[in-house]
């Protein structure tokens, strides 16, 4: 049978698809494009990927299937020519604090192996390489203990490993040994309890019991040699008179303890030990460098690299406040007189009054309040009827909160205290996450923690030249490991992530970054014959890095894979082998293939909206004149130093449309979101945000509201929907409750809510579907057979307006809703704002968890647009064009410019040149990503930016402004 040349799809009806028939070429780069909501993702992810993945998983055994997520069978008649499918979506990789860029890409696993095989241990005490110890050195060390000290000489045969060890214990008995120490307890070998093979155990063999005397050198040497043979070069001298503290003898025993010398036991190794300090490294194995294994993790922070500490800056967020006015945040909300009376007593002792500002208190007084006092102080308390006096030390706010945080069992109390805590680097390991033993092992004078701190670009250079500083034997061992590391670093470099460091926590990455990391890992795996489905991989990527990303996708295709990309980026569409344009409009008006073929064929197709934008027939117009910032009306940030920002001072003009631009990782989000937005939210809105480090920010008096419209979901449950989020559902319920039929039955607005008992269907509790758990198979959601998916009971549905019940209204599209409620302004205006942001196609009651990030962002924008404008609001949007077609970008720009026309200020972080060219003002941050960025490269109008040689944005913007004619601010229809 000849190999299939196409993926043939027949009758695809998932979501809004209208029975699509399509033949896609295999082993090609295919781009699916079309308006937002036209059905691209329904075709690419919910049909093609879902079926490819489902068929692959179904071919596995029932045992394997239970560990994999099964996809729902898509609504399609037939698909032929599918390969196993892998989807790389826009979601943040992992919120797990133990997950880093290094662990996700597997580079860290290879680095652990490299350090274990060619690393050289250095003594922290002398800075010299550690040599192995001889038996005579060990004997001398024991004889140096105080005479008469009672010791056990032990052979640590098993250290932190799982197993039952019956055979090993039987062998020991045969050899004549009598006692062992298992998990911190001594036993006769015959009496050792059965060990659970699922848990890790420590087993030490008792080789000798001795009392230190000068004449016992020969006996000690014999015993130590026996130990070294039994325990692979290790021996332990344990003090019989100093038992381990009880918490150390729990299961897991001493493996969880730092493995060098403690008071209870001294570890000897014929492998590595410092003769001066006795610092010993038990074994250099890859697990020593793992911060997810107790063997290598820093015992102080358990390998997290940071600890939650009460932060003095959060206790006193505004030093300019007086003590009576609530300068001390944890005490500010309390109505109890206790706290003020405590401060009065401290004031008598340290010479301050409650009317003093915190910043005017002496350093000594501030320290006493925060950290407590050594001297006793007299406190007088009075609460209504009772008064009493006490003399005591003052505990201090910081120690008090830390103690309560450790002791409390209440989740609420813990959360309340955590509002005043921030993560600080662990003092024991300096944030490197590993034990001192692991950090003592170095290659080329750097330990593994220092190498992971490098940016990917720097690390790549370091690993390139590393063989020059290794000897011939080390090179022979390292050659294959280095090849793997270099390749993976190259792939990360190719997808434009060279500014990230390997130690960067993967929870802090943006959706675009984590998607590109997964893309790099996939290329590293080198699979062929696979179907890859990607969702807008160019998000968050500057034009400069776009070509590298497209080369990566072409490489995936060239090694024998089919690559399907849902994308709106012009370069990506023009690079594709095959383009599918879905449309003609969004939602119910979409779901059809409008044009397909090569990019040229799509451009030539008169029906294709995408083709018209690609050919230049339609476009986003450059405004004929730009708004000029008014002198002095600006928010100015001084000395921003968060993340990679290098003491940045920059002004954001108000009353205009500003774009913050620059390459990925340059510091745009740190400047705008972490510094400016969080400070504004704190000062203007009274939010509890913690801004990044900066000197000061001026100009907040010009705004009365600041709003960050991001792409996070509007709700995580199926119960949240656009109507509830924008507030349209309340007037809809009120309207139904006001109808004559409802009044006659005595129904209040609550009757029409599906979240409370009364009007909802109780069989499905207002969900409309019932979840049936199927082990080994995907959970099945079946439509509730009582309400048939309507969510309400029959009596509620009897109340109708123009023949439609409340369930029918929730099932309408926004577009239909605007028409239906034309006479009800309270509802119509809210729905109209959703329609204006291009969401006319979504259902009024569509479940929030089915909205894409771009749609969720526009629902938030609609909510803001429907509010009364004060004309003094600062709107901040991070990449608002994500998921938007050229045509949608046009609509979005109209709305953002409309907000500015009302006197508001709009600031966007954006890579899309179509948006940047319409901006009144640009702040370009860079010039590179990571450590090479963090400076303001240029500020001014787009025409000013193109003249700046250092600005990458300027280069690409120049091409666009030269190519496209100027026009009015209206969109080209």
Image (cartoon, grey):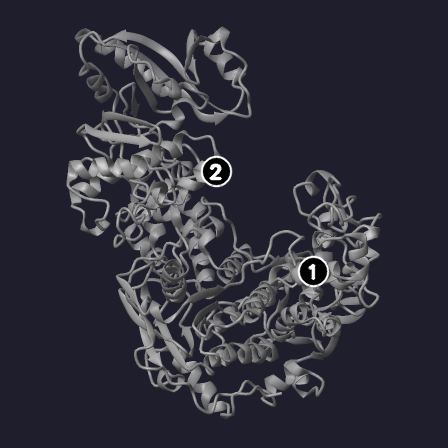
Q: Which numbered circle lies on residue 619?
A: none
Image marks 2 and 1: residues in contact by CB distance under 8 Å: no
User: Which numbered mark, 2 or 1, is in the foreground of this view?
Assistant: 1
Q: Residue at x 66, y 45 (%)?
A: 68
Closer to the camera, 132 or 451? Answer: 451
Closer to the camera, 637 or 733? Answer: 733
User: Upstream in the sequence, badge 2 or badge 1?
Assistant: 2
In this orientation, does residue 123 appear? no
Residue holding disc 2? 412
Closer to the camera, 943 or 4? Answer: 943
- Residue 371 lies in quadrant: top left
Compared to residue 303, the image places residue 963 above or below, namely: below
Q: Residue 933 at x, y = what percent? A: 33, 67
Q: Residue 917 at x, y = what percent? A: 46, 83
Compared to residue 957, the image places residue 129 above or below, namely: above
Residue holding disc 1? 734
Question: Hey, which residue is sitting farthest front in the picture?
Answer: 385
Q: Count all numbered tags in the image, as a single digit.
A: 2
- Residue 439 lies in quadrant: top left
Compared to residue 877, the image places residue 136 above or below, namely: above
Q: Residue at x 61, y 90 (%)?
A: 617
Q: Residue 214 at x, y = what percent? A: 17, 9
**601 lies left or right of 332:** right
């Amino acid at each position: 049978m000849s190999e299939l040349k196409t993926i043939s799809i027949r009758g695809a009806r998932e979501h809004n698809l209208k029975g699509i028939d399509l033949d896609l070429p295999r082993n090609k780069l295919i781009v699916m494009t079309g308006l937002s909501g036209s059905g691209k993702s329904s075709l690419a992810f919910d049909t093609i990927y879902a079926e490819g993945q489902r068929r692959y998983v179904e071919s596995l055994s029932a045992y394997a299937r239970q560990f994999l997520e099964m996809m729902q069978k898509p609504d399609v008649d037939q698909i032929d020519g599918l390969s196993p499918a892998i989807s790389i979506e826009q979601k943040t990789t992992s919120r797990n604090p133990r997950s880093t860029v290094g662990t996700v890409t597997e580079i860290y696993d290879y680095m652990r192996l490299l350090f274990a095989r060619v690393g050289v241990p250095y003594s922290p005490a002398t800075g010299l390489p550690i040599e192995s110890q001889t038996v005579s050195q060990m004997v001398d060390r024991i004889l140096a203990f105080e005479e008469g000290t009672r010791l056990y000489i032990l052979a640590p045969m098993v250290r932190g490993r799982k197993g039952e060890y019956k055979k090993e214990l039987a062998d020991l008995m045969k050899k004549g040994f009598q006692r062992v120490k298992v998990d911190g307890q001594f036993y006769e070998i015959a009496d050792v309890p059965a060990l659970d093979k699922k848990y890790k155990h420590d087993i030490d063999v008792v080789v000798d019991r001795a009392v230190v005397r000068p004449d016992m050198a020969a006996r000690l040497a014999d015993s130590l040699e026996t130990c070294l043979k039994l325990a692979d070069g290790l021996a332990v001298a344990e003090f019989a008179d100093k038992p381990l503290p009880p918490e150390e003898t729990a299961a897991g025993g001493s493996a969880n303890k730092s493995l060098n010398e403690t008071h209870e036991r001294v570890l000897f190794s014929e492998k590595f030990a410092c003769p001066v300090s006795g610092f010993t490294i038990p074994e250099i194995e890859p697990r020593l460098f793992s911060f997810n294994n107790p063997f290598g993790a820093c015992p102080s922070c358990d390998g997290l690299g940071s600890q939650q500490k009460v932060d003095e800056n959060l206790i006193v967020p505004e030093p300019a406040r007086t003590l009576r006015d609530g300068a001390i945040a944890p005490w500010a909300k309390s109505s109890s007189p206790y706290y003020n009376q405590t401060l009065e007593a401290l004031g008598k002792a340290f010479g301050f009054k409650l009317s003093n500002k915190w910043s005017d208190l002496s350093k000594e007084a501030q320290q006493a309040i925060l950290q407590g006092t050594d001297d006793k102080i007299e406190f007088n308390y009075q609460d209504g009827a009772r008064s009493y006096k006490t003399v005591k030390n003052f505990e201090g706010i910081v120690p008090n909160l830390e103690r309560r945080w450790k002791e409390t069992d209440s989740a609420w109390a813990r959360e309340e205290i955590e509002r005043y805590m921030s993560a600080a680097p662990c003092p024991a390991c300096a944030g490197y996450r590993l034990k001192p033993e692991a950090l003592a092992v170095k290659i080329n004078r750097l330990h593994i923690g220092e190498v992971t701190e490098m940016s990917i670009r720097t690390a790549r250079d370091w690993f390139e030249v590393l063989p020059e500083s290794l000897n011939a034997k080390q090179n022979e061992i390292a050659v294959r490991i280095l090849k793997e590391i270099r390749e993976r670093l190259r792939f990360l470099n190719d997808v434009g992530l060279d500014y990230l460091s390997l130690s960067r926590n993967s929870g802090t990455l943006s959706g675009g970054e984590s998607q590109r990391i997964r893309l790099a890992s996939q290329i590293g795996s080198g699979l062929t014959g696979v179907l890859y489905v990607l969702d807008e991989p160019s998000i968050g990527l500057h034009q400069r890095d776009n070509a590298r990303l497209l080369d990566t996708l072409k490489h995936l295709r060239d090694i024998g894979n089919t690559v399907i990309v849902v994308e709106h980026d012009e370069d990506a569409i023009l690079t594709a082998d095959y383009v599918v344009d879905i449309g003609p409009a969004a939602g119910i008006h979409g779901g059809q293939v409008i044009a397909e073929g090569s990019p040229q064929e799509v451009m030539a197709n008169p029906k294709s909206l995408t083709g018209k934008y690609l050919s230049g027939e339609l476009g986003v117009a450059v405004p004929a004149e730009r708004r000029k910032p008014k002198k002095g009306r600006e928010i100015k940030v001084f000395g921003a130093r968060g993340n990679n920002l290098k003491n940045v001072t920059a002004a954001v003009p108000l009353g205009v449309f500003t774009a913050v631009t620059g390459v990925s990782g340059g510091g745009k989000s740190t400047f705008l979101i972490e510094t400016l937005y969080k400070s504004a939210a704190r000062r203007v809105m009274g939010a509890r945000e913690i801004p990044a480090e900066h000197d000061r920010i001026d100009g907040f008096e010009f705004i009365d509201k600041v709003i960050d419209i991001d792409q996070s979901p509007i709700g995580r449950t199926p119960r949240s929907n656009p109507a509830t989020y924008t507030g349209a559902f309340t007037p809809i319920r009120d309207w139904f409750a006001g109808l004559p039929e409802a009044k006659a039955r005595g129904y209040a607005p609550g009757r029409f809510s599906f979240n409370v008992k009364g009007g909802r269907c109780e069989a499905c509790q207002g969900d409309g579907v019932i979840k049936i758990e199927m082990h080994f198979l995907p959970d099945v959601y079946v439509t509730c057979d009582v309400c048939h998916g309507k969510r309400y009971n029959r009596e509620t549905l009897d109340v109708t307006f123009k023949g439609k019940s409340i369930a029918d209204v929730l099932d309408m599209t926004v577009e239909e809703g605007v028409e239906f409620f034309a006479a009800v302004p309270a509802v119509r205006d809210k729905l109209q704002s959703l329609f204006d942001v291009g969401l006319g196609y979504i259902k009024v009651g569509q479940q929030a968890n089915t909205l894409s990030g771009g749609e969720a962002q526009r629902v938030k924008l609609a909510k803001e647009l429907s509010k009364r404008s004060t004309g003094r609001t600062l709107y901040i949007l991070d990449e608002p064009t994500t998921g938007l077609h050229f045509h949608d970008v046009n609509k979005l720009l109209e709305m953002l410019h409309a907000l500015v026309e009302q006197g508001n200020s709009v600031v966007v972080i954006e890579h899309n040149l179509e948006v940047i060219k319409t901006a009144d003002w640009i702040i370009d941050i860079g010039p590179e990503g990571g450590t090479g960025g963090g400076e303001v490269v240029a500020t001014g109008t787009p025409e000013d930016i193109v003249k700046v040689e250092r600005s990458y944005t300027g280069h690409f913007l120049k091409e666009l402004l030269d190519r496209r004619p100027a026009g009015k601010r209206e969109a080209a229809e």
